[in-house]
Image (cartoon, rainbow, N blue to C red):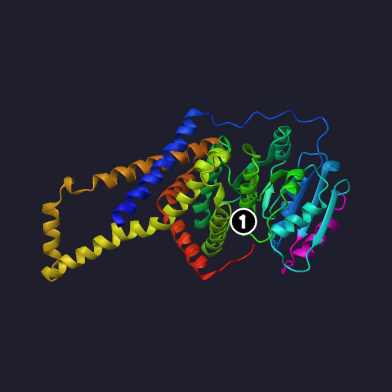
Amino acid sequence: MIDLAIWVMYFISTYFAVFWLLVILENKIKDETPGKLPKSLPLVTIALPIWNEEKSLVATLKSVLALDYPRKKLHIILVDDHSTDSTPNVIKEFLRTHAAALKNISIQSLRHTVNKGKGSALNTALKHAKGELFICLDADSFVKPNTLKIMIPYFSHKNVASVLPLMKLRTVKRFVLHLQYVEYLVNFFLKKVMSMLDCIHVTPGPFAAYRTSILRKVGGFATDNLTEDLEMALRLQKHNYKIIQLMNARVTTLAPTTMKAWFQQRNRWYKGTLMNLYLYKKMFFAKKYGEFGLFQLPMVLGAATVSIFFALFVIWQHMLRPFLLHVYDMSFISFNMRLVSEQWVSRLHFLDANYMILFFSLVLFGFGLGWIIYAFKYTEERVTASGVTSSALFMVIYPFFLSMVWWSVVLDLARGKKQRW
């Protein structure tokens, strides 16, 4: 049974890898042709849902003020979801010290009297939004000056509900950041490929732009959801709206700097993924949703399943099981290590290797390396010694960490454990 499960895992992984490789080979990886930048630029509401962001908030707001966009066309809404640190004071001080820079910008500062969650904070902003476009910006992310103008023309297509920028890490200085560095590049490159088939299933918080009228039409953001950005993407797909991923519009973000924080963040993300897949289970294999229903949603669930069992199977089948069998065999010769070493060397032969497992491992390694090379190329990231180190960690160590996160998700769901923000 275990061997069968391992072969299924290898098959699923190889199938998805080949599928996306064919998509890449058959299509040119480039941003879709945008419409023209309108002479009269639209009013844009930029919403910042905030909870305990005293350290990064000022830098985030400064990046908004540095946008290459007419001041009178910006509407900024700060929604403090009842922060318990000094965030409220940081907001007041920023508004006071930057009054001159904010003179021609419409800005509102709102505060919840109780903590309601990110979805509620975004809905509060949506309720007060004046802009034709509604942009979410996490308070630990930073937008490049030209990003907004790059994104605007894509909304000339009426069925476009959301346009997403490329997101990279702001700094890569610690071990846990190296683990995430390549992950971000690969994931956003994959999202670009998914965009070509209208298969994007998540609209991340950092500077995700929406058409305000569509957000209101579909009922705003979910307020009791761990991953409101993923739920919103699924809802937009359910209503057959288009989501576009760009590569030339840039945002940087601060990622968790400790393994504990990284683990908690991924636990929330993946728990939310499973919950939303169950919530939208009727979209699975539904032809009216095109490749998104027939392929993308099953792929997301399949990837989760493979991740859950990856570490268990690899550790058991290729580490613990051989070790225990070896110990059992040695018990018959009273653990005579000298005899074992002599016999092992004399009996060592290349035919003893499991070439089928080796073949699939090399195939998956080759696909993984190919994805990383493509990701570096199309995200315009230079290959440095640090990048090579991060790539090695991503390919060798990261799958085991992700598998452990997935197991924590399964255990949390079994216990009914759920968190917010």
Left or right? Give the position of 381 relative to 332.
Answer: right
Residue 58 in sight:
no
Left or right? Give the position of 17 relative to 124.
Answer: left
Residue 157 in sight:
yes
Find disc 1 in the rendering and name its residue. 227
Residue 82 belongs to the span the image colors magenta:
yes
Quadrant into which the C terminus falls: bottom right
Q: Residues within 10 Å of mark 1 (few under 14, many from 20)?
A: many
* Residue at image location 72% in from the left, 69% down from the top: 84
Q: Position of residue 100 (x, y in %)?
A: 87, 50
* Quarter of the view holding residue 211: top right
Residue 151 belongs to the span the image colors magenta:
no
Q: Is residue 260 above or below residue 171?
A: below
Q: Position of residue 178 (x, y in %)?
A: 50, 52
Dot 1 amino acid type = Thr
Quadrant into which the N terminus falls: bottom left
Q: Nearer the viewer, residue 88 or 381?
A: 88
Q: Which residues are magenta?
A: 80-100
Q: Position of residue 56 (x, y in %)?
A: 69, 57
